[in-house]
Amino acid sequence: VDAAHVDVPALAAAAAEEALVGPAAAEDDDDGAGAEGAAEGAADADSGLWSRGAGGPFEELMQAAMALSVVPRDAVPFPPRLAAALLSANIALIDALHRVRFGDVARGEAPKKEPSKEAQEASKACLLIDQVRLCGNVLYSNPQAQAFARLTTGLKALLSHCYSDPEVPMLREVGVFAVRNATVGCRENQQAVADLLAERKAAAAAAGPGAGLQPPLMAEFGLEV
């Protein structure tokens, strides 16, 4: 998943759409044209539901994954392959959404102080809050998942969502929750997060006040380094 491949206008339109109405099926006739029209309408409706994100099968899958992620680990260990699949997909998506919202600095884009309305609506359509919360759930008491987050872009992506946004309530809270779960009991991740925070603090100081998002405080994560 890459920011350049996220169709923000399409996602925004999907998020704003109040209802999905497929083509009207023709009445049944002798040559079966009505049944064919109904099948085409159902296919279009299914495609539209998937593209909508929130409110469609995508949201149902997210709810199922969320339910699995809160099952007590002492009763049923979380399957490693499922954890890897969820973290890979969710981290890639939230990272792409963040770059859509605030610019892809790594590719030379100027950082944006505020996301566009389309980017805000895309985040809601893609269930950004649930994506970050699910990462936190998967990382809880899961050393393999914590190592995965450290060895990939996971920690950096999660730290990028530890800020307040009035358009996306609870984003800061779920972001801090996810980072805390990624670091608790893991000295390597605690050091990695401390290093990332130091880098962001230095960058923010160099940019001056009003330069955009300010990094969270280290104390918020309960780090022991």
Image (spheres, rainbow, N blue to C red):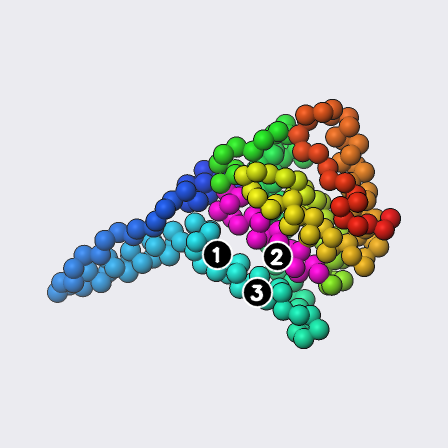
| Mark 1 residue element | helix
Mark 3 to mark 2: distance in Å? 9 Å
Mark 1 to mark 2: distance in Å? 14 Å
Q: Earlier in the sequence, mark 3 or mark 2?
A: 3
Q: Which mark is residue 217?
A: none
Q: Quadrant of residue 207?
A: top right
Q: Earlier in the sequence, mark 1 or mark 3?
A: 1
> Disc 1 marks which residue?
58
Q: Earlier in the sequence, mark 1 or mark 2?
A: 1
| Mark 3 residue element | helix
Q: Label 3 amino acid?
A: Ala
Q: What residue sits 22% from the left and 63% below the top? A: 35
> Disc 2 marks which residue?
134
> Disc 3 marks which residue?
67
Tell me if I can see residue 89 in this picture: yes
Circles 1 and 3: CB atoms closer than 8 Å:
no
Residue 125 colored magenta?
A: yes
